[in-house]
Amino acid sequence: MISILVVDDEHTITEFIKEALSEEGYLVETAGNGREALSIARKFSPDIVILDFMMPDMNGLQVLTELKKLDETIQVLMLTAYNSVPTALQAIRQGAADYILKPFDLDALKISVDKLVEKITLKNQLRYLQEKCCKTPCRFRLCALPFAADEQGL
């Protein structure tokens, strides 16, 4: 089951997203600030983090950096009320997978989450197939190739 951590200092937003994604079958936890998010992430090991950019204790980029130190495979979806191209680019450069503006459309959020789930699933399948291939004689020598998903930023 895919686990999701929703981080926003606006409680109504975290609860709204939690309810909507729980109905889709995801395991969802929430945090109200960056420090709480990092504490929960250490215990919960989320696959996806939906992360607000502006919070009182740590901004979203600081939390993103710390999350990637915990687990570089965590997929982070940034939320922000500020329509700033430089901010979006900085978040993507630091490892965010996607960026959504507030107020957001719930269907658009679900589509972004679905794309991240697909990415996680494909990466896991590729890793499984590569490991399976490496354990058996393989005429294609896939084991000698660098892990393609890592090279493509998947």
Image (tube, rainbow, N blue to C red):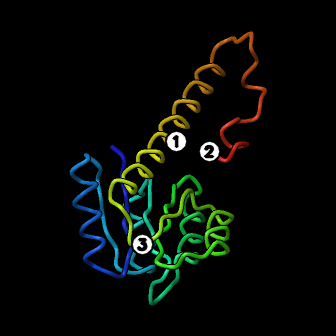
Q: Earlier in the sequence, mark 3 or mark 2?
A: 3
Callout 3: helix, strand or loop?
loop
Callout 1: helix, strand or loop?
helix
Q: Quadrant of residue 146?
A: top right
Q: Name the residue at 74% across, 14% down.
A: 140
**Dot 1 surroundings within 10 Å: few (below 14), some, or many (20 or more)?**
some
The x, y position of residue 12, in whole percent, is: 25, 76
For discs 3 and 2, the disc positioned in front in the rendered view: 3
CB within 8 Å, label 3 to label 2: no
Callout 2: helix, strand or loop?
loop
CB within 8 Å, label 2 to label 1: yes
Q: Is residue 143 positioned above or below 109 on the image?
A: above
For discs 1 and 3, the disc positioned in front in the rendered view: 3
The x, y position of residue 58, in whole percent, is: 51, 84
Q: Which residue type carries mark 3?
A: Lys
Q: Name the residue at 78% across, 26% down.
A: 144
Relative horizontal placement of residue 91, taking residue 38 as reference (left or right): right
Give the residue pinned by disc 3.
Answer: 102
The x, y position of residue 100, in whole percent, is: 48, 64
**Total tally of numbered discs in the picture:** 3
Q: Quadrant of residue 86?
A: bottom right
Give the residue pinned by disc 1.
Answer: 119
Task: Name the quadrant of the N terminus.
Answer: top left
Task: Name the quadrant of the C terminus.
Answer: top right
Q: Which residue type carries mark 1?
A: Lys
The numbered disc on residue 143 is none
Q: CA distance from mark 3 to mark 2?
A: 26 Å
Q: Compare residues 75 and 37 and report the one nearer the observer.
A: 75
The x, y position of residue 73, in whole percent, is: 56, 52
Q: Name the residue at 22% across, 60% down.
A: 19
